[in-house]
């Protein structure tokens, strides 16, 4: 009996992620959704600049590497050129909610029929632990060594809440990597997001609360704990928008 | 086909459609807006798309996405917009993506002005983005040439897998002249087997990327690209000579300025001064070999630009002090008159006579 099989939508290239990093799990969930729907040959992914920049080596579908923050605009170009294709971006919080905020908001406004997989780990991973737009108040980062002070450094951005106000956003859900139950829910959300794209309903985004043990200065176990005790209360899990629910009513 | 009277900017739009381009991404800015507005009307009629992006940054990255799928795609802007696009253009180059980018130049720096300018020459030919890179830069000098070159630009882009820039200006964009779209002979082009358009389960996945974390690999990739640049320099240099054969003084000017320079040359010839004009049509690759040849025959050069002097550097590099290289420019949206340029030619001629 096969108990563990690598999804076909993942290549054989080993992940470069740190021990305890949840990027790898999210890759797997995305690949499983692609496998289940049988859409690998019709999918084009857009990698960000951030720790997941090399995701273009990991996903077996055609991949494009975007400039920092511009994945939603790149995905727009892809989708408009090839409306018959599934198009997804995979982005970190700095990429999506700081440098790329305008691009993010406007794919929502336009109702661009793409899927965004958004990794919120409350930190800049790749560049070594600087403050992210999602860094919590009080959280220590290399550029907020005394903790993020909203009076000085501003407040975190809640992406799902913000995007759910836009008419073109069809589906927005926040999930978490802190437990098996939550990972299962994350899988359902990612699948749903691709289904929403298949139905041509508009922007679908899944925000995944993720760990960065390396830059949080925690062990993998402590990181999962902090995700549960500190991040989830600030970023409540759940469905923020689902136009299919309205249709079902 | 009968010629129709059209504006330079409208011709870019129409010629792009003729070239098979069905995707345009842009952001409004004077004096290039007619390109977007014409395409907004025309694209839906040919099952194409003209999309107004939220910024030039978004527009150029939409171009990156569309070009990655192998589609022909166009964007246009004017000077400040090109500054915003420069990161994306560097990525387009680094990812070997064909596309056509138009700069209808206006005065700068900063918000500058909205009148014609050629002050983005350095940007276009030297530093259109970070890193070791070039673009093919075309400089049309008539509305007909805009039409022909826009179509040619798409072919060049596909043949060499590179962005191609059409460097226009506010005057060329607004100028109305007769044009037909029949002059272009399509090239034989390679298949886009690198495109990220969906594997269909039939091949290994394609990756469109500009990241090479190993320095030796990056160096190799850049060097390979520069070999392509050598081929472009070998095969694609274009210029127009006007009365240069016996000229004592050769003007060098491109785009709108070349038209003024030509009139000044004619005026000087009438007055008995042997003036001529060399008009670069490709700014990158620059006709440097040809200028070096001319330097063996003529006694002086006069570069005329709508800038404080940018292309003149390339002229000096090509001429290598064989003969004097003079410069005359207006900037900020000001245009030199034919008389002004003729007076400059006369001044240089008189001083050469004195020296002789
Ligand atoms: C224009 C530009 N500015 C800055 C950078 C440097 N940079 C690379 S990744 C990154 C932050 C990435 O953080 P995030 O998006 O949160 O992703 P993570 O690494 O945490 O997965 C920054 C600032 C860049 N590559 N390009
Ligand atoms: S730095 Fe953080 S986000 Fe990046 S791979 Fe390591 S743990 Fe993951």
Image (cartoon, coloured by chain):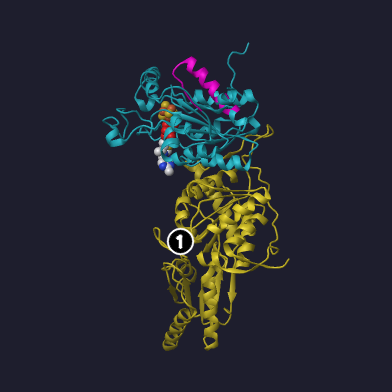
Q: Which residues are magenta?
A: A172-195
For the colour cyan, the matching chain is A
Q: Chief secondary structure of the magenta span?
A: helix
Q: Quadrant of residue B333?
A: bottom left
A158, B186: nearer the viewer: A158
The quadrant of the rendering that contains the C terminus of chain B is bottom left
Residue at point 72%, 68% (across, down) = B2
Q: For the residue carrying disc 1, how many other residues have a C-alpha within 10 Å: few (<14), some (14-19), or many (20+)?
A: some
For the colour yellow, the matching chain is B
**In the displayed structure, would residue B90 be above or below residue A218?**
below
* Residue A29 x/y as whole percent: 54, 23
Secondary structure found at label 1 = helix
Q: Which residue is mark 1?
A: B122
Task: State the count of labels.
Answer: 1
The quadrant of the rendering that contains the N terminus of chain B is bottom right
Residue at the limit of the structure toward the front, as seen here: A249
* Residue B80 x/y as whole percent: 44, 56
B290, A155: nearer the viewer: A155
* Residue B100 x/y as whole percent: 58, 54
Q: Is residue A192 magenta?
A: yes
* Residue B237 x/y as whole percent: 59, 64
**In the displayed structure, would residue B227 be above or below residue A43?**
below
Res. A127 in view: yes
Q: Is residue A233 magenta?
A: no
């Amino acid at each position: 009996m096969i108990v563990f099989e690598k999804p076909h939508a993942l290549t054989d290239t080993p992940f470069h992620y740190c021990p305890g990093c949840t990027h790898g799990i999210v890759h797997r969930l995305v690949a499983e959704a692609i496998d289940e729907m049988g859409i690998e040959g019709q999918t084009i992914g857009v990698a960000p600049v951030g720790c997941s920049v090399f995701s273009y080596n990991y996903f077996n579908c055609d991949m494009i590497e975007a400039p920092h923050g511009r994945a939603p605009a790149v995905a727009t170009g892809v989708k408009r050129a090839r409306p018959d294709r599934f198009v997804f971006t995979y982005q970190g919080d700095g990429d999506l909610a700081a440098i790329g905020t305008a691009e993010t908001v406007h794919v929502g406004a336009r109702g661009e029929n793409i899927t965004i997989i958004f990794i919120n780990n409350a930190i800049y991973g790749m560049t070594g632990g600087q403050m992210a737009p999602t860094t919590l108040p009080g959280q220590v980062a290399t550029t907020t060594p005394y903790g993020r002070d909203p009076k000085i450094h501003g407040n975190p951005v809640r992406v799902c809440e913000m995007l759910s106000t836009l008419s073109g956003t069809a589906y927005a859900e926040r999930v978490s990597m802190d437990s098996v139950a939550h990972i299962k829910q994350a899988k359902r959300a990612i699948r749903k997001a691709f289904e929403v794209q298949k139905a041509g309903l508009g922007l679908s985004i899944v925000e995944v609360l993720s760990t960065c043990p390396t830059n949080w200065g925690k062990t993998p176990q402590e990181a999962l704990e902090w995700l549960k005790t500190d991040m989830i209360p600030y970023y409540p899990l759940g469905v923020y928008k689902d136009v299919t629910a309205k249709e079902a009513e | 086909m009968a010629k129709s009277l059209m504006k330079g900017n409208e011709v870019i739009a129409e010629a792009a459609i003729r070239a098979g381009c069905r995707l345009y991404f842009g952001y409004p800015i004077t004096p290039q807006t007619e390109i977007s507005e014409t395409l907004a009307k025309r694209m839906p009629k040919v099952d194409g798309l003209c999309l107004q992006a939220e910024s030039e940054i978004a527009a150029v990255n939409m171009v990156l996405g569309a070009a990655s799928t192998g589609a022909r795609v166009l964007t246009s802007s004017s000077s400040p917009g090109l500054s915003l696009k420069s990161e994306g253009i560097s990525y387009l180059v680094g990812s070997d993506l064909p596309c056509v980018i138009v700069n209808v130049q206006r005065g700068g720096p900063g918000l500058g002005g909205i009148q014609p300018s050629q002050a983005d020459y350095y940007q276009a030919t030297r530093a259109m983005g970070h890193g070791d890179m070039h673009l093919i830069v075309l400089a049309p000098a008539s509305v007909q040439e805009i039409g022909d070159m826009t179509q040619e630009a798409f072919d060049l882009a596909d043949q060499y897998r590179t962005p191609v820039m059409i460097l226009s200006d506010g005057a060329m964009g607004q100028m109305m002249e007769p044009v037909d779209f029949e002059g272009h002979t399509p090239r034989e082009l390679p298949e886009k087997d690198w495109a990220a358009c969906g594997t269909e389960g039939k091949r290994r996945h394609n990756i469109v990327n500009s990241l090479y974390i190993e320095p030796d690999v990056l160096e190799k990739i850049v060097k390979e690209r520069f070999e392509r640049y050598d081929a472009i320099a070998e095969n694609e240099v274009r210029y127009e000579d006007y009365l240069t054969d016996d000229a004592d003084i050769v003007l060098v000017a491109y785009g709108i300025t070349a038209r003024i320079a030509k009139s000044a040359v004619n005026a000087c010839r009438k007055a008995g001064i042997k003036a001529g004009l060399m008009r670069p049509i490709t700014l990158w690759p620059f006709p440097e070999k040809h200028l070096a040849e001319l330097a063996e025959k003529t006694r002086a050069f006069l570069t005329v630009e709508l800038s404080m002097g940018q292309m003149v550097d390339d002229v000096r590099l090509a001429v290598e002090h064989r003969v004097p290289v003079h410069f005359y420019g207006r900037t900020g949206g000001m245009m030199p008159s034919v008389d002004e340029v003729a007076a400059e030619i006369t001044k240089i001629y008189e001083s050469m006579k004195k020296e002789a």
